[in-house]
Amino acid sequence: MDEKVLNILLVEDDQVDVMNVRRAFEKNRIVNPLFIAGDGIEALEILRGGLVPAARRIVLLDLNMPRMTGIEFLRELRKDPMFMHTPVVVLTTSNDDRDKIEAYNLNVAGYLIKPVTFIDFVELMASLNKYWTLVELP
């Protein structure tokens, strides 16, 4: 397996946003495996069930979701010794300073506001992919 492959868990309840991530990956020729969870509860089940390989695993996390919000998910993730160091990038529409502070207090690797246009979204995904390609992850 290519050592630069990222195993990406997208935690997103909005199917249009999931489709936009997939389309942005296609446009940028990003071939990293993409695993999808519709909310924080499902994401924890997927992680704890071993469905996302542990090597070079990152989470792209929306904050505004039903059942378990992104912040609630982060709290649970950080309490679990198996996943407490998993890199998480928040990808959300929330520009609320309280959300940003709470997310950074829970050790997110970044906090990104979803762009309004698809072209900007494609560029954001390209930049994020380039960054994670350069970062040394276990």
Image (cartoon, rainbow, N blue to C red):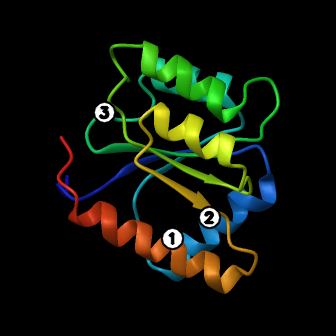
Q: Quadrant of residue 84?
A: top left
The three-letter amino acid code for the residue at tag 2 is: Val
Secondary structure of residue under mark 1: helix
Dot label at residue 59:
none
Quadrant that contains the C terminus: top left
Rounded to the nearest angstrom, the CA distance separating label 1 from label 2 is: 8 Å
Mark 1 vs mark 3, CA separation in Å: 22 Å
Q: Residue at x 48, y 22 (%)?
A: 77
Inspect this view and state whether residue 31 appears: yes
The residue pinned by badge 2 equals 21
x%, y% of residue 29? 44, 78
Label 2 or label 3, whichever comes before in sequence order: 2
* Marks 1,2: beta carbons within 8 A: yes
Q: Check disc 1 and give the amino acid type.
A: Met
Q: Secondary structure at mark 3?
A: loop
Check disc 3 and report the residue beneath it: 54
Q: Earlier in the sequence, mark 1 or mark 3?
A: 3
Is residue 105 placed above or below 115 in the rendered structure?
A: above
> Is residue 14 positioned above or below 21 on the image?
above
Tell me if residue 11 can be seen.
no
Q: Position of residue 13 (x, y in %)?
A: 76, 43
Disc 2/disc 3 C-alpha distance (Å) = 21 Å
Q: Residue at x 60, y 46 (%)?
A: 100
Quadrant location of residue 116? bottom right
Residue furthest bottom as drawn: 119
Q: Could you tell me which secondary element the residue under label 2 belongs to?
A: helix
Mark 1, residue position: 125
Amino acid type indicated by mark 3:
Ala
